[in-house]
Amino acid sequence: MSARRRLVLALVTLGAALAVVAAISLFVGSAALSPGAVIRALAGRAGGESVESIVTLQIRLPRVAAAMLAGGALAVAGVAFQGLTRNPLAEPAVLGVSSGAAFGVVLAQIFGLGLTVLEALGVASFAFAGALLAAAAVYLIAVIPGGLSIQTLLLAGVIVGIFFTSAITVLISIVDFNRLGGVVHWLLGNLAPIPAGSLAVFAGLALLGFWLILRHARELNLLALGEEAAVQLGVDAERLKRRVFIAASLLTGTVVAFTGPIGFVGLVVPHLLRGVLGQDNRLLVPTALVGGGIFLLAADTLARNLISPAELSVGVITSFCGAPVFIYLLRTRYRVAL
Amino acid sequence: MTGTAAACQLLALLLAAAPAGAVTVRDMLDHEVTLAAPPRRIVSLVPSVTEVIYALGAEDRLAGRTDYCEFPAAARAKPSVGGMVNPNLEALVALKPDLVIATDEGNREETFQQLARLRIPTYLVHATRLDALHDMIARIGALTGREAAVGPLRDGLARRVQAVRRAVAPFPRPRVLYVIWPEPLIVPGRQSLLTELIDVAGGESVTSRQEQAYVRFSVEAAVALAPQVIVLADHASANGGTSNAGRPEPEKWRRFASVPAIRAGRLYSVDLSILHRYGPSVVDGLESLARLIHPEAFR
Amino acid sequence: MSALVEFDSVAFAYPQPERARDGGFALADVSFAIEAGEVFGVIGPNSAGKTTLLRLLTRVVAPARGEVRLEGRPLARLAHAELARWVAVVPQDAPRPFPFSVEQLVLMGRYPHGPGRFFESDDDRALARAAMAATGTLELAALPLEQLSGGERQRAMLARALAQAPTLLVLDEPTSHLDLRYQAETAALIQRVNAERGMTVLLVSHDLNLAAEVCDRVLLLSRGRVARVGTPAEVLRRETLEEVFGCAVSVDVNPVSGRPVVQVAWPSVRAGR
């Protein structure tokens, strides 16, 4: 079966799965709404001020959209970082990029930026800058002649992540100690309903990042030959690395700006997809966009309803899934030569 | 004080006089809050507010609370919407509230933004001093239509506070170290109500020079301030004894034999968790605290 | 036959000290030409600059002085993808880790012919299969590269280069990890590719006898300079080799092909035997 046909088949399957998960997420929640009530609200036939209308249209629906976008963006960023570093363990949280973005967001919030459309762009810019900073730091620490040292990359990611998280704690403690509890909670990742205008900004930035990576998917494959060989095949390797790097940081920064740092989506989803589809980035990037949405949406629905009415942060669920995958990959793929 | 009293009376008049009309009031952070009618389904996201509502006998207007609103015990019968930091929005909306009362110390800014998006009026309180607590009681009384109960409640509290002041007035004021949380060491700073309570109870909080309300303090610095009385807040008994978190561990402090409080044997660990919930019961805590600091005044 | 590749007074030095271990070695005043259709060898001791020469040819690095020309046009003026349509390199080692199949590897060679395409065309796929058939790797198409033996991997890498349909095929140490059998097969493959497809071949090798057998002309590099250029018989002379390589050698003639055969004169350790 040609790559093109496999891609179409995979997208159709994943699309159907996404629809199912989205439907479940809309029907399940702390406010006990019957499926009929939800459908009425979606069809616009419930009263504008009724509980089902508010809960379905203003709480659940925006949250579902945010989860799909955030999950997709994080998964695509994961594929991109993995293609760049030729290392299936690379993903925004592991590389400390999420923490850098989170630092940017906290900084923006101290300057008073909130959730309105224009301010959201501002927050996203700060997050993007923070993400770039962290990613650049990790890259510079780990780069050696001939490529990236894998061990150093992972360690550098951990350190950079810790650094930025600590910086956040310090910043908040100095500026407003009362808010520390809230910020710590946000750092676990938090899919809250986002107003429609900001959601549009979120979607726009995420799709931009996605497209930037998709158009280089074939060249990312070629990087697997080694940088020199890729250049000899006609790939402008430096430009490719730069663009993918920036696009992946943009995706990470965008997600963190709107939902806080959520880890391991970029690790688990590409790993699962590779098991089925293989290593071709042309298949992985589009399917990650959909697959990531499914994963995060499922995780969030679980997080919100496991111990209802109390809620777990979605980052808790993704970490519980992600840590075993990380360990598995570490043990099987990395016979590290000492 | 008269200014806020006047505002409360105006609020009460407005609420009483316009049962069907919209009313705009200002909350304790001076934000405008518009209510379509006197609120009948209030969700309280603040334990002290919940306590005041019950103290004023307005619990019939309370539709929901947080997990931490456990005082008085009757409050547990009301449905909870989750924590203070992360209340469950769906559960909250399902209660169909017409007013949410919250605080900027303990609830998150993001929650207020979400409530604003959902067009649920949110009234913010901020009470870190005894007079602010008095103000808050008046405001809640006005909001719930229980103005009649405000006077007796406030007078009762004020009388007890005055009694404490008078009892401890003749005595020298010892230096008091109050340990809110042992590890990491957290102590009250100038903006904390605890500092004022210690002052009323006839003591001088050694950490009062710190600006913030809650300060992460170093044990060395605390010891170097040579407190004459040390009070360790015991949270563990409040947790039902199920966890060791917040257990005061007085033995750790007894090591510092040179500290005046240790030499004089004035190290107390007591369940004063009521002091950490800034409702009317804080006066109970004040009285207990005064007895610890000045046992001679209450013989 | 006109010159396909010209090196014109090319000089290059790696910036110290990062490349110090890799030679750090300057190429100084290197001038030679490769004629279209010939099999051209580059030989010399390890740090003589063979790899550097290759990198200059494929524009991985640029010369500090002088110019490299392809069919008369300066290399610097060619776009990366265009150069890749002219020159294909079979590297010494297969990339590691490499999680793709043989067919996916060979298809990568089609990139320079359609860099804007997202998926390869049917033509691309047909040419890839032809390249695999020519190297005897068609039956390995679906296997992951990492599962192949050294010889099979080498042939797969060659298939990829052939799929690139270059005018100049560059082979970097093609027999370095191979068994005798595969060394012979590789030599045959080089000659077949050159004869059947008219492909110019540049062979970089430290195997002097391989170069002697298959090359029309060889370039002997010594310490970044051209020591000699000419036919194997002209270049592989005892005195020349001893001077460049710094050890005693003997040069005979292969009775079958008439080409020189170089042998190291092993130092005699066992006295009196």
Image: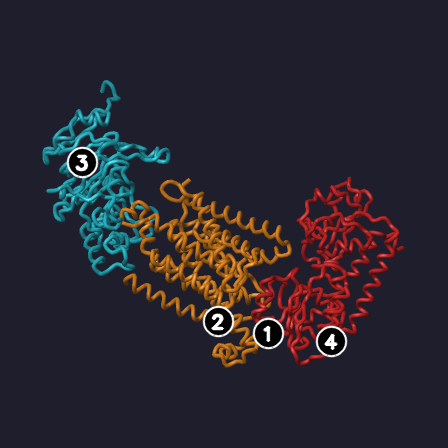
Chain colours: A orange, B red, C cyan
Question: Between tags 1 and 4, which lies in front?
Answer: 4
Question: Between tags 2 and 3, which lies in front?
Answer: 3
Determine if residue C141 is in view: yes
Residue B236 figure quarter: bottom right
Question: Between tags 3 and 4, which lies in front?
Answer: 4
Question: Between tags 4 and 2, which lies in front?
Answer: 4
Residue denoted by label 3: C32
Whole-percent x, y for residue B235 in the image: 71, 56
Q: SS at mark 3?
A: strand
Residue denoted by label 1: B94
The answer to whether tags 2 and 3 share a subunit is no
A145 vs B250, left or right, is left
Q: SS at mark 1?
A: helix
Disc 3 marks a residue whose amino acid type is Phe
Marks 2 and 1 sit apart, C-alpha to C-alpha, by 19 Å
Residue denoted by label 4: B13
Disc 4 marks a residue whose amino acid type is Leu
Chain of the residue displaying label 1: B
Residue denoted by label 2: A24
Question: Is disc 3 in contact with disc 4, using a CB cutoff of under 8 Å?
Answer: no
Query: Residue drawn at (65%, 61%), measured in percent from left and top?
Result: B104
Question: Between tags 3 and 1, which lies in front?
Answer: 3
